[in-house]
Amino acid sequence: MNGTAIETDVVLARAGDHAAFTRIVERTANTVCSIALAIVRNVQASEDVAQEAFVAAWKGLGQLREPQSFLPWLRQITRHHAHLWRRRNEREIGNEDALQAAVDERPRADYALIAGEERELLTQVLDELSEEAREVLVLYYREGQSTKQVAALLGVSDDAVRQRLSRSRALLREEMLQRVEHVVTRTAPGAAFVAALAAVIPGPAATAAMVTATSAVTGAAIAKASALGALMSWAGVLVGMKLLGPPNDEREAAQLRRFRNAMLLIVTLGAAAVGFAASRSLMAMTLTLQGVYAVIAYCYLVRLPRILGERKKSRRATIGGAVTAAVAGSMLMGFVVLLLRG
């Protein structure tokens, strides 16, 4: 699988490109359906779960910040929906045999080819294996028996895939494996699955509106966080200046006014810079905040003592100002993170 191509399509799909997401579905349908089958152990149900997973991914693309994280994110969504399906049906019906009955009683034409004996065999074989081994076994047969391809799709090493296959072969008879290979290969999702999914995915206009709304909410949250951070930082600066007491003369008073105004400007610009960086990534926000801390520390620990000279209160004023400004910055960072995660 070409990871770069998927990442490119993720960026396009996130902007509302319906065709790009269809290409993603074509490339990942085997993976998603195989993961779902490993959990629900029913071919038709696995495609229903896969459809739910793809729709959820389509709607949630605006929240995915890193395109290279798409495959792990999609696998997690699939497992979540598959386990939900099992819990829902086990609670309603109460036994493993009834899981088959939970599926549509009027199966599609392609599933009519799967005899009851084959369904029972598939369920029996999958029950013998762990969930990880099931995923590997099903995907291995659907991906042309390429362990490297399975490893890339599941985000594990080639050695891990080989080990899980080896354990599966040790548990199952060769005859059973051959019959299971026949079933899972024949029931791999094809063009019909992609076409059916395209029919239920919201169109480009709806997705563009969804992305715009998500961006607007995030932008508003960051703007509020930046404004609050600036206010807290202003309070830190003013409290630090209060600790200085009255100036010795007019010259010192003028220097302190310039220092105060410069600090107010610095923390205001710093809050805006941190907010902008937060809209990009958590790492960018952290690095920007560290830069703001460095500037504040230099001003309070180097510039301010030069203005105060030998005054007795200089040490207390320096420490007090630096601490209050640092606390304000920390509160800003925490608030931005909470808003972004919320």
Image: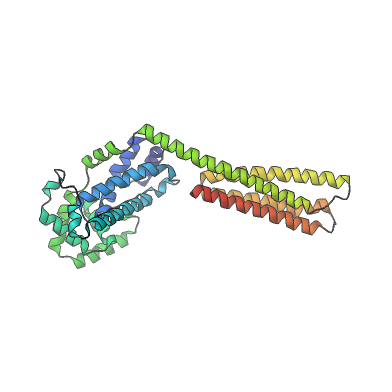
What residue is drawn where x is 29% and y is 38%?
Answer: 200
Which one is nearer the viewer's eye here, 151 or 319? Answer: 319
What x and y, as percent, mark residue 58? Answer: 36, 42
Is residue 69 left or right of 49 when viewed as pictured?
right
Task: Specify how the rendered protein is coloured.
Answer: rainbow
What x and y, as percent, mark residue 151? Answer: 31, 56
What x and y, as percent, mark residue 243? Answer: 78, 54
**Which residue is outermost to the top?**
205
Residue 168 location, quadrant: bottom left
Number of disc labels: 0
Is residue 115 left or right of 229 when viewed as pictured?
left
**Which residue is outermost to the front?**
92
Which one is nearer the viewer's eye here, 222 or 130? Answer: 222
**Which residue is outermost to the bottom?**
170
Which one is nearer the viewer's eye here, 90 or 42? Answer: 90
For residue 16, say whether it is visible: no
What residue is drawn where x is 49% and y is 40%?
Answer: 217
For residue 133, say whether it is visible: yes
Above-or-below relation of 99 to 264: below
What residue is drawn where x is 28% and y is 48%?
Answer: 50
Residue 136 location, quadrant: bottom left
Residue 63 location, quadrant: top left
What x and y, as percent, mark residue 303? Answer: 77, 51
